[in-house]
């Protein structure tokens, strides 16, 4: 016959085993979540650097101000910084390898990095002082920056890119002369 004490000891043992499994599972989940947040934070830092680099290369292509001039040396610096950002991006976005193609290469670069590489090539072209429609080149880099932002947002955690509908902005005309009077008066000292 089984004693009441041995059944109680077994129940306590089972309870402790289940509790241990639950605690281990919770620790694993929290560790996974922390790693994901760490990746998102590092990805955000890298994305900020890329956006700034693309904006500067865009300006170097076709400055709005006649007083803004980028030398070939400055364009080459922009190029190598963009090149380094492509390689840093590979830490987040490795090449896609298609085993079915039969090719013996390192794979194909992902779209998000294509946008950065496009800016790198534009800066190299400017550094070499080759003739090109610089306004068209600026438009390409502007479009690459927009595509980059959309693609990198899709990779981030939802909490980092979620905006409530009621926070949607409005269309801002690109000509400040058409804005009318300011709603709030500026008071300068």
Image (cartoon, rainbow, N blue to C red):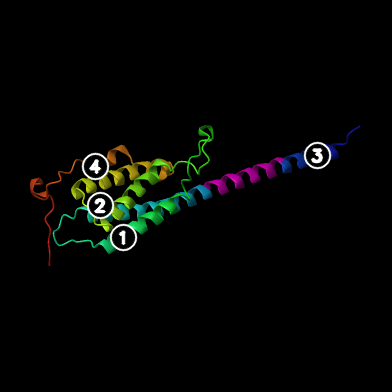
- The residue at the point 88 percent across, 34 percent down is 2
Q: Do the numbered discs 3 and 2 sit on residues whose CB atoms are within 8 Å?
A: no
Of the two numbered discs 4 and 3 on the same chain, state the one appearing first in sequence: 3
Q: Position of residue 137 (x, y in %)?
A: 23, 47
Say what secondary structure mark 1 lies in: helix
Q: Quadrant of the N terminus?
A: top right
Does residue 175 lie above or below 98 as drawn? below
* Pointer 4 local density, CA inside 10 Å: few below 14, some 14–19, many at least 20: few
Of the two numbered discs 2 and 1 on the same chain, state the one appearing first in sequence: 2
Q: Do the numbered discs 3 and 1 sit on residues whose CB atoms are within 8 Å?
A: no
Say what secondary structure mark 4 lies in: loop
Decide whether the magenta segment is chiefly helix, strand or loop.
helix
Q: Quadrant of the C terminus?
A: bottom left
Q: Nearer the viewer, mark 4 or mark 1?
A: 1
Q: Residue at the right extreme?
A: 1
* Pointer 1 local density, CA inside 10 Å: few below 14, some 14–19, many at least 20: many
Of the two numbered discs 4 and 2 on the same chain, state the one appearing first in sequence: 2
Identify the residue position indicated by label 3 in the image.
10
Q: CA distance from mark 4 to mark 2?
A: 25 Å
Q: Position of residue 135 (x, y in %)?
A: 18, 48
For residue 76, the mark is 1
For residue 58, the mark is 2
């Amino acid at each position: 016959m089984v004693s009441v004490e041995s059944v109680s000891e077994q129940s306590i043992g089972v309870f402790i085993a289940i509790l241990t499994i639950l605690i281990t599972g919770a620790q694993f989940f929290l560790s996974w979540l922390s790693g994901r947040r760490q990746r998102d934070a590092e990805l955000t830092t890298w994305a900020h650097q890329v956006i700034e680099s693309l904006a500067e290369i865009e300006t170097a292509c076709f400055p709005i101000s006649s007083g803004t001039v980028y030398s070939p040396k400055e364009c080459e610096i922009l190029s190598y910084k963009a090149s380094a950002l492509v390689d840093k991006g590979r830490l987040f976005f490795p090449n896609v390898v298609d085993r079915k193609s039969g090719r013996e290469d390192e794979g194909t670069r992902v779209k998000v990095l294509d946008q950065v590489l496009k800016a790198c090539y534009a800066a190299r072209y400017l550094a070499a002082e080759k003739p090109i429609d610089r306004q068209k080149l600026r438009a390409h880099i502007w479009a690459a920056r927009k595509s980059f932002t959309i693609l990198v947002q899709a990779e981030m955690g939802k909490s980092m890119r979620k905006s409530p509908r009621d926070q949607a902005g409005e269309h801002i005309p690109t000509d400040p002369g058409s804005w009318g009077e300011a709603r709030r008066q500026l008071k300068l000292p």
